[in-house]
Amino acid sequence: MRRAFSPATARRRGDEIVQHLFSGGCVAPTLLVLALGACSPGPPRRQLDALIGQSPEQLVRTLGVPARSWQTGGLQFLAFDRRVSALIPGSGPVAQQPFQTPIPFSAGAGLGTPPEVVSRICETTFEIAGGRAVRWTKRGPGCG
C-alpha cells in the first residue's frame, strides 16, 4: 500500500534530493538540466481550463499583464510568458595564478566548466472571441 506524503514531507524529500544531486560532482549539472527540462513554469492545465469563458480582464487578474496581444479576423489573442531559470554550478579544478588568486579553468581548456544560467520559457496564448476566452495553447521548451 502506498502512503501519501504531506506537502512538508514532500518538500523535505525534494530538498534532500537536490542536496544529493549537488554533492555528486559533475553528474549534478547534467541531472539539473534534465530536471529543469521537466519543469512547467506555466499554470497547470486545470487552471487554464478554468479560465475558458472568462473575460480578458479576468485573465489579466489571474495571469498578470500579457507579454503580447494582437487582433486578427475578429479574434483577440493574449500571450502570457512564464520563465524558469536555474544556475548550473561550474565544475573542475582551480588554478593558482602567480599572484595566488584562484581562477577556475575555462571550458575551452577541457579541465572544468564555468557556472551557467539556463532558462526555459513557456508561452500560453488565449484566444478571445465575443469578449470571452474560448481556447488556449502552450508552446516553448519550458512547457513540459
Image: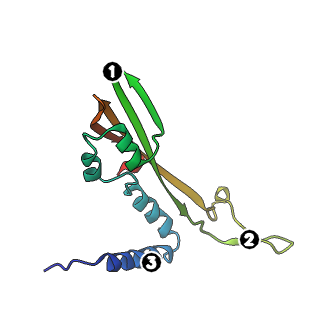
Task: Indicate the quadrant where residue 97 lies.
Answer: bottom right
Give the foreground label among 1 and 3.
1
Q: Name the residue that disc number 2 marks.
A: 95
User: Which of 137/56 is in front?
Assistant: 56
User: Which of 42/110 is in front?
Assistant: 42
Q: Name the residue that disc number 1 marks.
A: 74
Q: CA distance from mark 1 to mark 3?
A: 53 Å
* Mark 3 and mark 2 residues within 8 Å of each other at the beta carbon: no
Describe residue 43's horizontal placement relative to residue 31 as left or right: left
Report the amino acid beneath label 3.
His
Measuring from the top left, give residue 125's x and y in whole percent: 36, 38
Describe residue 111's horizontal placement relative to residue 56 as left or right: right
Report the amino acid beneath label 2.
Ala
| Residue neighbourhood size for the residue with mark 3, other residues' Cα within 10 Å, grouped as few (<14), some (14–19), many (≥20) | few
Report the amino acid beneath label 1.
Gly
Q: Which residue is outermost to the left?
A: 1
Q: Name the residue that disc number 3 marks.
A: 20
Name the residue rendered at 50%, 78% in the picture. Answer: 23
Q: Which mark is residue 11?
A: none
Dot placed on the residue nearer the N-terminal end, 2 or 1: 1
| Numbered disc 3: secondary structure | helix
Asked whether residue 29 appears in the rendered view, the answer is yes
Dot placed on the residue nearer the N-terminal end, 1 or 3: 3
User: Which of 102/136 is in front?
Assistant: 136
Task: Indicate the quadrant where residue 134 lies.
Answer: top left
Name the residue rendered at 50%, 74% in the picture. Answer: 22
Q: Which residue is outermost to the right?
A: 99
Measuring from the top left, give residue 106's x and y in whole percent: 68, 60
